[in-house]
Image (cartoon, rainbow, N blue to C red):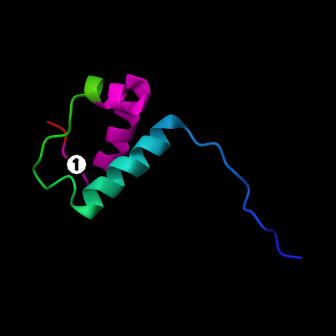
Amino acid sequence: MDKLLDPILRQPLSDALYVQLRAKIISGELKPGERLPSERVLSEESGVNRGAVREAIKRLQQAGLVAVK
């Protein structure tokens, strides 16, 4: 018998934020060259700590989706 539902997996907050920001970049909602909000603003808006924000931004940088100056 096939399963009705897939297992619900917990994921780190940085992963969830990475997925959201990546989707906004790919969809064009965040334009090339546009500055991301500050760590503080991203933290407040997403409800995650600044460490998770830094990790998400680091992953975006490694994926070539953002440049950190």
- What amino acid is at disc 1? Val
Question: Which residue corresponds to the image point at 37% horizontal and 24% vertical from the top-left?
Answer: 50
Specify the quadrant of the image occupied by residue 5.
Answer: bottom right
> Is 48 in the magenta?
yes
Question: Which residue corresponds to the image point at 55% horizontal and 38% vertical from the top-left?
Answer: 12
- Give x and y (percent) for residue 66: 22, 48
Residue farthest to the bottom, as pictured: 1
Residue farthest to the right, as pictured: 1
> Is 52 in the magenta?
yes
> The N terminus is located in which quarter?
bottom right
Compared across the picture, whether 69 is left or right of 14 comes to left
Provide the major secondary structure of the magenta segment.
helix
| Tally of marks | 1
> The C terminus is located in which quarter?
top left
Q: Is 50 situated above or below 58?
A: above
- Give x and y (percent) for residue 21: 33, 48
- Give x and y (percent) for residue 54: 35, 31
Q: Is 48 situated above or below 22?
A: above
Residue behind mark 1: 66
Question: Which residue corresponds to the image point at 35% horizontal and 57% vertical from the top-left?
Answer: 23
Is label 1 in a helix, a strand or a loop? Answer: loop
The region drawn magenta spans 42-67
Q: Is residue 64 visible?
A: no
**59 or 4: nearer the eye?**
4
